[in-house]
Amino acid sequence: MMRDHLLLTSCQKRRIFVHTFGCQMNEYDSLRLVRTLLLRGYVTTTKPSEADVIFINTCSVRAKAEQKLYSLLGRLKRLKDQRPNVVLIVGGCVAQQLKGAIVERFPFVDIVVGTRGISELPDRIERVFELRSREVFFPDEETSLGLNHLDVASTNWSAEVVEFVTIMQGCDNFCSYCIVPHVRGRERSRPSHEIIEEIRMLSAKGAKEIVLLGQNVNSYGKNLSPPVRFSELIERIASETDIIRLRFTTSHPKDLTEDLMACFRDISILCPHLHLPFQAGSDRILSMMNRGYTQLDYIKKVERIRSYRPDIALTADVMVGFPTEEEKDFRETLKLIEIVEFDGLFSFKYSDRPFTVASSMGPKVDERTKTRRLAELQKLQKDITFRKNRAEEGTIRTVLVEGESRLGSGQLTGRTPHNRIVNFEGPKELIGKEVAVRITEGYAHSLKGELMMENKL
Ligand code: SAH
Ligand code: SF4
Ligand code: F3S
């Protein structure tokens, strides 16, 4: 009897499948939707064919990202033909970019939601189930941004070892190539107390490390009244919560202030890793990109931050093939990479995006040249990263264990404070703990290690 009852309820539970493209902010938005739905009795599934609700959270930052959505929607059309009751949702930055055009082009989509509609989404999904309505909405503002509404006591969701917290939305920088300010709107910071409460709640649920998210976290708090500095927020998090590691992303070089750099020296929970995109090495291109700094400014910032924290790991975003980029401009990008010696780079081929100033700049760089430049740049960086990873061999690092490694066979995975991934053998009970690991091998993208016997440094 009891068993039947349980079976019935689990069958009735709606299953949600989520596919997220793009940045960590999209990941965070997807997660806050999922967690809200879990509290309403939904369950998650990894198979779209079994789902009652499918949420596609889209990214529009490069042309390729947009194309990926279209091929996915093509596949989902077949699924929707077979199971018409599935609620198919397109959200995120492409939804905001194309607005109503999504349903004109893909009439089988049930809900189109803009970048500020996540908190409204659960009720809209219910409406579709009840009324089979079509919901297309693009709010200008979102009333509830974070996860603060979630019930800490609920067993329906648990925190990961590493959790993300969005501290601000939108961007006011208008880099000439970038669609983000157009689809994410103006820069808005969340009040500090709300962020602190969210971190406390996640920590109570077992989170150990928090990554603060924003397109340009360095300008956090400028629009709050009274204004709050980003370094003040970091200090508050360090003193008012009990998380053991803190990171943030992304930083804009022009807003990287001395007080923030000093945090890397003074605040022990702040990990020695900074993601500081530079985008290009040529001053002419940087100016056309509207980045607000020169190559020399960037190098000086790097020297400055290294004076506060000599061992800091640096990563960045960079692109090749911005309109008018010549070979000598590209050489400046390579030069900057050689001077700074980044620990890792995310590198992209420039592509035209709607609404942006750069899309009407020319002449454009042809695809073959972009491909060649990207390959050359990636080769240079690969060698640097590999060399740095090899230099880790023999060191003992404190690793926060995040989970079981995808490599399988009883391996655990975690990160060093410098954000290097380490795989090593150990018992699952260590997940969520900081342990001492001796690094035995450095590879291109990760490290291999050995758990130290006493487990302390
Ligand atoms: N706010 C972050 C980055 C957001 S987008 C920052 O300012 O650093 C992530 C990366 O995508 C950018 O850093 C840039 O390198 C890349 N990107 C943005 N627009 C692009 C475009 N039109 N073509 C190719 N890459 C782009
Ligand atoms: Fe885009 Fe520039 Fe804003 Fe980053 S800072 S999101 S690259 S406009
Ligand atoms: Fe992409 Fe939107 Fe993030 S365009 S990078 S998902 S803000």
Image (spheres, rainbow, N blue to C red):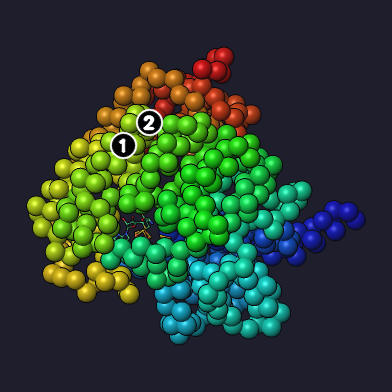
Image coordinates for residue 324, horizontal then vertical, percent: 14, 64
**SS label for mark 1:** helix
Quadrant location of residue 289? bottom left
Image coordinates for residue 72, horizontal then vertical, percent: 44, 67
Instruction: Say above or below: 44 vs 265.
Output: below
Q: Let me know if residue 149 appears in the view.
A: yes
Q: Taking the image as four quarters, which one is ligand 3 found in?
A: bottom left
Q: Residue at x 31, y 36 (%)?
A: 304
Quadrant location of residue 313? top left
Q: Residues within 10 Å of mark 1 (few under 14, many from 20)?
A: some
Front one among 58 and 322: 322
Image coordinates for residue 349, horizontal then vertical, percent: 25, 58
Front one among 138 and 455: 138
Horizontal side of residue 31 vs 311, given as left or right:
right
Q: Let me know if residue 24 appears in the view.
A: no
Image coordinates for residue 210, horizontal then vertical, percent: 55, 43
Front one among 136 and 444: 136
Judged from this view, the residue extending furthest toward the top is: 454
Judged from this view, the residue extending furthest toward the front is: 226
- Mark 1 against mark 2, which lies toward the viewer? 1
Quadrant location of residue 427? top right
Residue where numbered disc 2 is placed: 309
Instruction: Say above or below: 60 vs 161.
Output: below
Instruction: Say above or below: 261 vs 141.
Output: above
Q: Residue at x 50, y 33 (%)?
A: 267
Judged from this view, the residue extending furthest toward the right is: 1
Horizontal side of residue 397 vs 193, given as left or right:
left
Number of dots carrying numbers: 2
What amino acid type is highlighted by mark number 1?
Arg
Q: Residue at x 39, y 49 (%)?
A: 251
What amino acid type is highlighted by mark number 2?
Arg
Residue where numbered disc 1 is placed: 304
